[in-house]
Image (cartoon, helix red, strand yellow):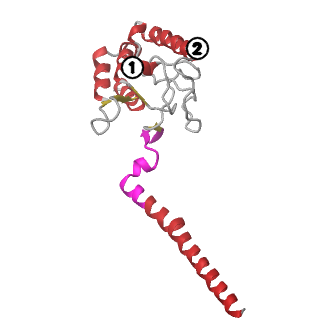
Amino acid sequence: MNNSLANTGRLVWSALRMLLVLTVVTGIVYPLAVTGVAQGLFHDNANGSIVKTDGKEVGSELIGQTWNVEGADEPDPKWFQPRPSNSGYDPLATGSSQLGASDAKLTKMVGDAKKQVAAFNGVPESEVPKDAVTGSASAIDPHISPEYAEIQIRRVAKANGLTGQQVARLVEDHTEGRTAGFLGQPHVNVLKLNLALKDLTTR
């Protein structure tokens, strides 16, 4: 009986020591090591890829945002506009509309959006690209296609008193290629593009 209790005690003590060691390793040492590496080698990425201008945080390279008229719920013609978002670019409410391609509601939404985008930018509906009227799977994609940026050039130039050539050069300079040369499609980060536009208009 005493041997049985002693064996049980040793097993319990061994288990407690193992629990303590694993808690320290996986709960303290490992997180600190990963955090240290992330902060040391990938500081900006680890902190959300925050973009600052004049010392003020204006957004993240990874999360889209609206560019509306101040105090209103309508797009500001001075800025390049992002693709639509059913969550309002809320990072806590990511996800698509979950409507299928044949859904009548989605078809109407896309049709109405195409008319609005075409009218807003002064282009035929046939020139409106898909990403101008459909949201991304995450609903917070910060990028648009070069095609969507291009149909906005004339409107943005006029609203800011710039030439089309000046704004077109901005779009060209901020068009990024496929990731690693073969993943995804060429894209434009709307936040970076609009900040460059702001710099151009304040010179």
Lower position in the chain sequence, tag 1 or tag 2: 2
Q: Is residue 185 left or right of residue 2?
A: left
User: Is any part of residue 79 visible from this angle?
Assistant: no
Contact check, label 1 and label 2, Cβ < 8 Å:
no
Q: Secondary structure at mark 1?
A: helix
Q: Secondary structure at mark 2?
A: helix
Question: 50 or 96: nearer the eye?
Answer: 96
Q: Is residue 55 magenta?
A: yes
| Point 50% across, 70% down: residue | 25
Q: Is residue 15 left or right of residue 186?
A: right
Q: Which mark is residue 194?
A: none
| Point 40% across, 13% down: residue | 155
Which image quarter holds the C terminus? top left
Going by the numbered disc 1, the residue's amino acid type is Tyr
Within 10 angstroms of label 2, few (less than 14), some, or many (20 or more) residues?
few
Q: How many marks do you count on the picture?
A: 2
Which image quarter holds the N terminus? bottom right
Question: Could you tell me residue 37's position as x and y percent?
Answer: 39, 59
Going by the numbered disc 2, the residue's amino acid type is Ala
| Point 44% across, 60% down: residue | 34
Q: Is residue 197 above or below residue 60?
A: above
**Can you tell which quarter of the image residue 3 is in?**
bottom right
**Can you tell which quarter of the image residue 17 is in?**
bottom right
The residue beneath circle 2 is: 104
Question: Could you tell me residue 92's position as x and y percent?
Answer: 58, 39
Question: Could you tell me residue 4's position as x and y percent?
Answer: 68, 88
Within 10 angstroms of label 1, few (less than 14), some, or many (20 or more) residues?
many
Q: Which residues are magenta?
A: 36-58
Q: Which mark is residue 148?
A: 1
Question: Could you tell me residue 30's position as x and y percent?
Answer: 47, 65
User: Is any part of residue 41 visible from this angle?
Assistant: yes
